[in-house]
Structures are given as C-alpha cells and as structure tokens.
Amino acid sequence: MNPLPDHVHPAVASPSGFFRRYVFSTDHKVIGLQYYFLALAAVTIGIVLSLLMRVHLAWPQAHWPLVTGGTLRPEQYLALMTMHGTIMVFFVLTTAPLGAFGNYFLPIQIGAPDMAFPRINMLSFWFTLAAFLCMLAAFAVPGGAPISGWTAYPPLSGLGSVTGPGEGMGQTMWIVSIGIFCIASLLASINFITTTIEMRAPGMNLTRMPLTVWAWFVTAVMSLLSFGALLAALIMLVLDRSAGTSFFTPAGLVVNGELQSGYSGGWPLLWEHLFWFFGHPEVYIAILPGMGVTSHVISNFSRKPVFGYRAMAATLCAIGILGFLLWGHHMFVSGMNPYSSLAFSALTLSIGVPSAVKTFNWLGTMWGGKIQFDTPMLFSIGFVSFFVTGGLSGIFLAQPALDNLLHATYYVVAHFHLVMGVAAIFGIFSATYYWFPKMFGRMMDETLGKLHFWLTFVGAYCIFMPMHFMGIYGGIRRYADWTGATYLAALQPLHLFATIAALVTAAAQLIFFYNFVSSLTRGEKAAENPWRATTLEWSTASPPPVDNFAGAFPTVYRGPYEYSVPGAPQDFTPQHLPPELAGVSEGATHA
Amino acid sequence: MHESEVADRTGLTLGENGRGGRGGWFSGGGRDGNAGRSRTPERAYITGIVIALGAVAMFFAALVSAAVVRRGSPSGDWQPLRGASTVWPILALNTMVLLASSFTLSHSRLRARSGDDAGFRRWWIVTSALGAIFLAGQLFAWRQIVGAGLYLATNPSSSFFYLLTAAHGAHVAAGIVALLVIACRPARRMARRTAIEVTSVYWHAMGAIWIFLFLFLFFGGRS
Ligand code: HEM
Ligand SMILES: [Cu+2]
C-alpha cells in the first residue's frame, strides 16, 4: 500500500525513484509530456506513411527495390491510407491538443495542483499507449494492416479477410485499438471536466478562465458524449465479424465472386450514422484546442485583450452544441432521406456563423495591436489562415447538390486536410513554441522557428490547394492509381507537384525536430515569464514545481487577457496580482 | 500520518459534508487560503461520477437508437421476440429485484449517515446480494430465450436483446464489485461517506437505465 496518497504529499516533494517520477507518474505535467511524445512518435510514422502514398501517386508505375513485385499493390496503398488517417486523427490530433497541452496546462491555468483524479489520468495515458501499440501491431499480423479507411465502413470492414488481406486480423486489431482508445478518451474527459468544475482557484470564475481552458473544457464535453457512441458501434462491428450477427452486414452480398451467406439484411447506413455521430464531433475535438491556443497567443503577441472574450467563449460552446447536430453532412450520397439532407445542410451552414465570429474576433484582436511576430504568433496566424481556407470549402460541401459531385473526391481531401490536418497541427506548433519555455525551462530558437513556419506554411498550401482542382475535375479519392481513367490523366502533373511539395514540407519538419532537441539542452535559459503574459502558468517557475505553485496557490483578481490596461505600470497585468501590487483595480473581466 | 487523512479513513465519524466547500460553480473558486488546496475536494468525486454517467448514458443511447434504426431498416428482417413468452415475467421479476436493491441501498446510506455502522454494512451487503440475484436472473432469462431457439445471431431483435442486457449486466457487475470493495475496506482516496455517495449515484443510475431498457425491450422487442 502506498503510505502517502499523492494528495497529502508535502507541497514540493516529488515522488522518488525514476519510475514513479517519469514513467508511472500521476503528475499531470509528466503525463502531458508523455502524451506529447506519444503524439510526436505517431506524427512521425503518420508522415512517413503519407510520403509513401504521395510518392506512389506521383509515380504509380515505378518499381521500388524493397517492395515485393516491384510496384505497390492497390491493397497495400489502401493499408497505408487507413493507417495514415487513423494514426493522424486519433493518435496525433486527438492526443496532442487535449491529452498533451490540456493535461499540462489546464490545471496550472486554473490554479490547481493537479487534475482532480491523478491516477485515472495516468490510466488514460497508458490506455492510449496500449491502443497505439495495438494499432501499430496491425502492420505485423498476417494479412497486414486494414484497408477500410479511418471510417471503417461496413460491409468492407465487417466480413473478414474475404474483402481483402488486411480485413482479417488487421481490422480486428484496428477495432480493438480504437476501442481501447475510446475508453482512454472517456476517462480523460471525465477528468478534464471535473477538474475545470471543481479545482479552480479562488477568484477564477468562468469569465476569468483563459480561452484555452474554455476550449479544453468544451472539447472534453464533446469527447465525453461522442466516444461512447463509437464504442457501441465498434462492439456491434466485432459481433458482425465474429458472431454472425447482421447489424451492418446486408444479406445476399457477393464479394470476389463469393456469396456471403448467413447475414439477414443488416444496414451499412446504421454504421454511418453511428460513426459520424462520433466522427463529426471528433473533427472539432481536434481543432477546438487549437482555437483556444490561437486566441490566447494572438492576444499575448498583439499586446491587446482578446476582442470579444465572451463571444469567443460562447462560440466555442455553440460549436460544441452544433457539432452534434450535423453528422449527416458526411452522408449526403448514402441513400439517406433527402429531407434529412436538407436539415443537415442547413445546420451545417449555420456552423459558419460561430466560425466567422471567431475569425473576425481574431482579426479584431490583432487590429491596432503592437504585434510581435514571434514564432508562436506566426503559427497562430497560420492557424487562422488555414481555418478560413479549409472552412470555406466546407461551405461548398455542405450543399447536397454540390456534394453529390464533390463527395469522395480530392476536394474533400483538400477540405479536411487544410482545416483539420494543417490548422490543428499549426495549433499544436503554436502551443509548442509558446509553452516550450514553460515546459522545459529553455527557449526555442527563433530563427529556426521562423524558417520552419514559412516552409511549412507555403509547403502545406502547395500540397493541398491543387487538390481542390483535382476534386472538381472528378479526381476520386482513395484510389491507388488513376492510370486506368483516361479523363484523369491530365491531373498527373498536379500529383507530381503535390508530392514534391510534400517531400519539401516533410523535410522542413526536420528543422523543427532539430530545434526541439537542441533547445532542450542548449536553448537560452527561459525566465519565469518570457512572453510577458498574464495567465497563471507564467506566475510560477519554468518548469513548474510538482504541485505547480510551490505551496503558494494563487488567488485570481482579474480576467485572463489584461494587456495594455490604461494607467497600468506595465503593458500586462497578471491574473494573480492583487490590486495593490498591480497598480490597477480588480477587474471582473473585459469587453 | 497526516491528521486529516486519519479522519478521512475512519470515514463515518467525519463531519465533512461531501457537497459543501464552495458555492455554485458559476461563482468561481471559493475555497480560501491555501488550506486543503493541494488535494482534490470531496465533492469532485460526486461530480466525477455524474459526468461519467453522462458517457454511460450516451453509450446506451447509441445502442438503443441503433436498435430503433435497425428495426426500421428497409430489408424488413426484424422479427419480434416470439416463442419465449416466459422471458418477460422473469425480466419483470428481475426488475423488481433491482428496484428493491435501490431501496436497500438508500436505507444503508441512511444508516451510515446516522452513524450505525453495523446497519450500514448489513443493508449494503443485502444490496450487493440483490444485485447478484438480478444478474443470475438475467442469465436465467438468457437460458429461456436460448431454449426458445433464439441465439445471438438468429435475428436482429435477439442480437439487440443479448447486446443490451449484456452491456447493462456488465455495468451492474462493476457496481457489485464497487459495493463489495467499499464494504470490505476503507476507501483510500476519499472519505468513506463520499465513496458511499459515489457508489449510490452509480447504482441508482443502473437501476434507471435498466427500467428504460426493460420497457424498451418489452414494447419494442415483442411486437
Ligand atoms: C465551415 C465549417 C465546415 C463545413 C461547412 C464543413 C462541411 C463538411 C462537409 C459537408 C463534409 C463532407 C464532404 C463529403 O464527404 O462529401 C466535410 C468533410 C470533412 N470535414 Fe468539414 N466542414 C467544416 C469545417 C470542418 C472543420 C473545422 C473540420 C476539422 C477540424 C472539418 C473536418 C472534416 C473532415 C475530416 C471531413 C472528411 C471526413 C472523411 O470523409 O474522411 N471540417 N466537411
Ligand atoms: Cu463533419
């Protein structure tokens, strides 16, 4: 038995022993870093997989030394695609923004010593890691990785290896992995929500919470309410695959010339409903934390309060609610009742309103500010740029009439990579450059950071912009090779261009890795508050002590973004400074 | 050992009100000074279980709405659960047992509040036993429909019958484990009284979910 449960540890002592401290730690900061490094490993694998696909798309007929048979077979391409999408969506875009940064900074920003349930927090991480290893193991099982994409539509995913080599063991591993991931995410979201409700410092009322906290909170609510639906769907899929039930698998299906007997008329559309009821909230789970970071960073580096703080918090909530009502926009061509399409279309378009409010408020925050273009700021501006570019194509896809043409083409690929892939990754980069000094006590290199930004910014646009044209031209997605379709031959130069851009952009990430690793040991030592910021994480040491505040827990006197307050002695007024010390009176919040 | 912790472990004698501490959460943190700030407040555990039940509810909502959608699927293969007429009286009986367990649990909680440890323990064990009887009854119901030739894959209606009862049964089994753990040893991280509250909230919720599932199966599965 553990003699001293962690909540009664003396304020500053950290658990002794390497394993308790860095491996099986219950400290939210260590767990946050564990999530971060997990996401870093996952994104590296995900990028390698995508490069293999891109190279194949540019030179579909080329012979490669290590590939059996010389060229990539279509099912191998589909396996790469499935694993790329799954790893990126679940283990990078869900893990890094919430699991890593949310874990590390949510408790500190609300003035708490840790998460409400530190051990459950540790469990969430270890489940996520187990899920990740299980997913990677799908490459190694007989038949290899699954081929049904990150959406795992039945009947392709429901019948076993008759539909493709990876659909045997590989698909089973996929389902088990995502099932574990669901449980990990549910546990984590319970922790995030409870912590935000119960662990806030005195004075930290809702309108004084940083927008990052608001974003993590809404994200956690969304994952709480969506992952359970995915788990239910996965259980039914497993039963279809192994127990002969017909939840999703229709009767009389002929696959590869073989009649699939024993199924009584299941409904693939049912999977689509369950999956997208989870899947659409999931895309917002990936991006909301990035929105929070962007608001936070733009205010900090414009030396201005966030324009419309309350509107920013309210639109996060609005997106969270609306996000549950529009999953059907992924199913316009599925044979769903056209009247539902109409409703889903209208609801989808309405999410443009809160999105536009956020965008204009980001611009409004920068307007007239003394903008400092440090790397975190550049990445946040990049976030806004990609969010707008990608969001605009969403408006087109949200019209059923247009989507009939654009569905399952590269237009959709362009849309979601810009808005979910790149924008969310820019949020992660912004957060990394911004909080690196707090997490590791050293600054990252600014010159390398700016170089990394510009190469990635231009590179990402070069990769994904041409895909809009491919899609409008009828370029179908999820095909290994278009050479059979003569009308698409004209698009081959675009594929080549995108591949070259992808290779350059991927190479630019080496700059980031180099900067990250070398700054860990050789970066300039960071002060407590290098960005002259206002929120609580900047009121404590870099890196923070075990209980975050060395026993001196803060009281909060004002809103989170009090920059350039007229009459204040300096251009930022930290949240924890009492009126006597701050030189300005206590503020409830601002506009 | 830290003094407050000793008090925590003895649990029942502790006068701490699990829901006290601060005002509504719109007012922001109200715990003043540094005292107690390095630990999780007791009421967080209750908030936590309520939130966790939100996820559980969504899980069951997904299964139930899947059943509704599947029943209306254009293939028209859904067949009512006929030929197992004995199963409904058994399920009704099980429902009674689970309902009764909610009453014994409330009683046990009241005993604990008034400091009657033996009474608390007695009714707490009775609750666990009723939970176990419920599970045994559910298994018996399964035997009945197996006897009527309805297996997991026979028809979507039987598939959902097994799926819903199994998913609920697993949650009840977890609840029984929690009940037994609390009966056997003092809670380590929270006050005993909080542990009792948390388990009660969960157990009552399982009863409520079952009543919903029972009505759903009865009216949706038979016809
Ligand atoms: C103005 C806001 C947006 C609108 C109107 C919109 C609309 C749509 C529509 C209609 C589709 C379905 C296209 C099809 O499959 O035919 C779609 C796909 C998608 N969207 Fe959006 N979207 C918006 C913002 C976002 C955001 C913010 C994200 C993520 C952060 C996102 C991620 C995705 C993803 C991942 C897919 C494709 C999923 C797949 O088929 O694999 N979208 N979007
Ligand atoms: Cu969507």
Image: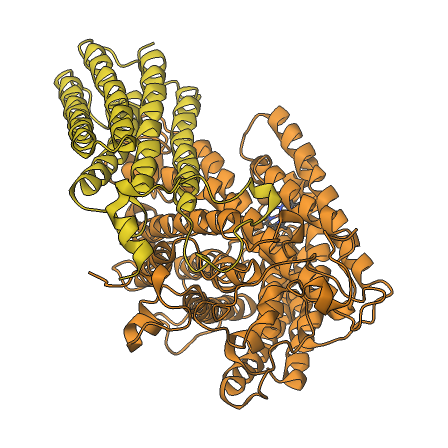
Chain colours: A orange, B yellow
Closer-to-camera residue (A191/A455): A191
Question: In what quadrant of the picture does the N terminus of chain B appear?
Answer: bottom left
| Left or right: A222, with A392 as reference point | left
Q: Residue at 57%, 66% (x, y): give it.
A: A428
* Residue A263 visible, this orientation: no
| Left or right: A103, with B85 as reference point | right
**Residue A547, how many percent across, how many down?**
45, 67
Question: In what quadrant of the picture does the C terminus of chain B appear?
Answer: top left
When the figure is inspected, residue A126 is found, relative to residue B143, above or below; the finding is below
| Left or right: A70, with A351 as reference point | left
* Residue A382 visible, this orientation: yes
Q: Residue at 63%, 76% (x, y): give it.
A: A529
- The residue sitting at the bottom extreme is A522
**Residue B171, how many percent across, how many down?**
28, 35
Q: Residue at 55%, 43% (x, y): give it.
A: A280
- In terms of image quadrants, where is residue B134? top left
**Residue B70, how many percent across, how many down?**
40, 24
When the figure is inspected, residue A190 is found, relative to residue B139, above or below; the finding is below
Count of numbered marks: 0
When the figure is inspected, residue B89 is found, relative to residue A380, above or below; the finding is above
| Left or right: B184, with A557 as reference point | left
Closer-to-camera residue (B94/A75): B94
**Residue A45, how many percent across, how many down?**
44, 69
Closer-to-camera residue (A266/A362): A362
When the figure is inspected, residue B89 is found, relative to residue A587, above or below; the finding is above
